[in-house]
Structure formats: C-alpha cells, structure tokens
Image (tube, helix red, strand yellow):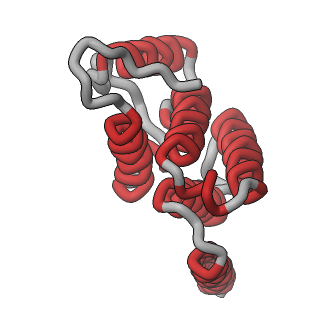
Amino acid sequence: MPGLTSKIKRGAKYLITKASALHQDVKDEMNGASTVHTEVQHLYNKVKIIMELEGKKLDPQVKEAAQCMLNDLQAVLEEDSSHGPLTRHHPSGQYDLAEKSIDIIFKYQPKLEAAPGFWNQIKAHINTFIEKISGEKNVFETQGTAFSKSKSFQDLKQSVTELRDEMKSELEPDEPGTKFEHR
C-alpha cells in the first residue's frame, strides 16, 4: 500500500500543478499577455511540473539549477507584466522578454539537462556554447536528466527562440544595408 499512496500523492501534486498553470494561463489571457509572455509562462510551468513530479529523483545540483531558473523566469515575467500593454505587445517589448528568457535558458541549461559528473558537465557546457554561437545542438553526447528527456520542455525552449527571431525580423528595417540595432 505505501507504493499506492505515493502514486496517489504524486498524481494529486501533478493535478494541482496543472490546475495552477491553467489558472495562470487564464489570468494572462484576461490581462492581455503577449505571445512571448505566454510561452515563457508555459516554460516556467513546465519546469515547475517536472520538479514536482521528479523532485525526489533529481540530483541536488539539477534541483538547484531548476529552482534558480524558476526564480529568474519569474522575475522577467513580473518585469514584463509591470509594463503597459503598448510596451508588452510591441515587437521590441516581446523581443526583450524573449532575449532575456533565452539568456536564462542558456545560463542553466548545462546543469539542468546534463546529469552530474565532471566530464558530462564539461561536455554540456561546450554543447551550450556551440549552440549559442552556431545553433548546432548536442555536438557531444551527454547523459541527460528529466529536463533533457522532456519533449514538451525542449519544444517550449525552441518556441521561445523562434518567437524571438520572429520579433527581431519585425524590428529589422526593410532597407538593404541597414543594420538591426536594438536600443
């Protein structure tokens, strides 16, 4: 019976976390959250759900990285919410939010997605660096965590990057030879 009780508790935690995420989605919709804000909120919720479900199985280093990522994402979401609707929905406001969120993703990606171990972490940091400068992913194979194995987590990260690129293209001038400069 103890195994059944823990499964019921995990299921209840999952349902509560999903309900909280749905409540946040409804609040964002009512407050007129931008597309980027909504995707970053989904990423935040996904990290929280993985932590709830896999918390006991995660290495302390991975848990710490996930909690720090949650804190940083929450801060940029709150900052974005503090702006007026014109700023939030303007491509430059959405671009700023996406850019800050991507910086947070890259900051925690090596510790969050690669299992502990000196060489595994070194390979993860090199992979992150290469992905940041060239877009090439997983040059070196690493042992993963629940975060690297979650397709929806990976899809949300990719979605934020695509939205950032979309906002950047909306901000770029149409004239050839002019350079995009933000701020």
* Front position in the image: 98 or 149: 98
- In the image, residue 152 above or below residue 11: above
- In this view, the residue farthest toward the left is 176
Whether residue 81 is visible to the viewer of this picture, yes or no, is yes
Position in image of residue 161 (x %, y %): 40, 40
Position in image of residue 73 (x %, y %): 67, 47
Q: Residue at (78%, 56%) from the top-left corner?
A: 82
- In the image, residue 138 above or below residue 54: above
> Which picture quadrant has residue 128?
top left
47 left or right of 114 in image? right
Position in image of residue 61 (x %, y %): 69, 33
Q: Residue at (35%, 41%) from the top-left corner?
A: 170
Whether residue 127 is visible to the viewer of this picture, yes or no, is no
- In the image, residue 171 above or below residue 152: above
| Quarter of the picture holding the N terminus | bottom right
- In this view, the residue farthest toward the front is 175
Q: Residue at (60%, 27%) from the top-left corner?
A: 107
| Quarter of the picture holding the C terminus | top right
59 left or right of 112 in image? right
Q: Residue at (69%, 52%) from the top-left corner?
A: 80
* Front position in the image: 154 or 172: 172
* Front position in the image: 1 or 83: 83
46 left or right of 133 in image? right
* Front position in the image: 116 or 92: 92
Count how many numbered circles sit on residues in the image. Answer: 0
> Which picture quadrant has residue 12?
bottom right
132 left or right of 50 in image? left
> Which picture quadrant has residue 5?
bottom right
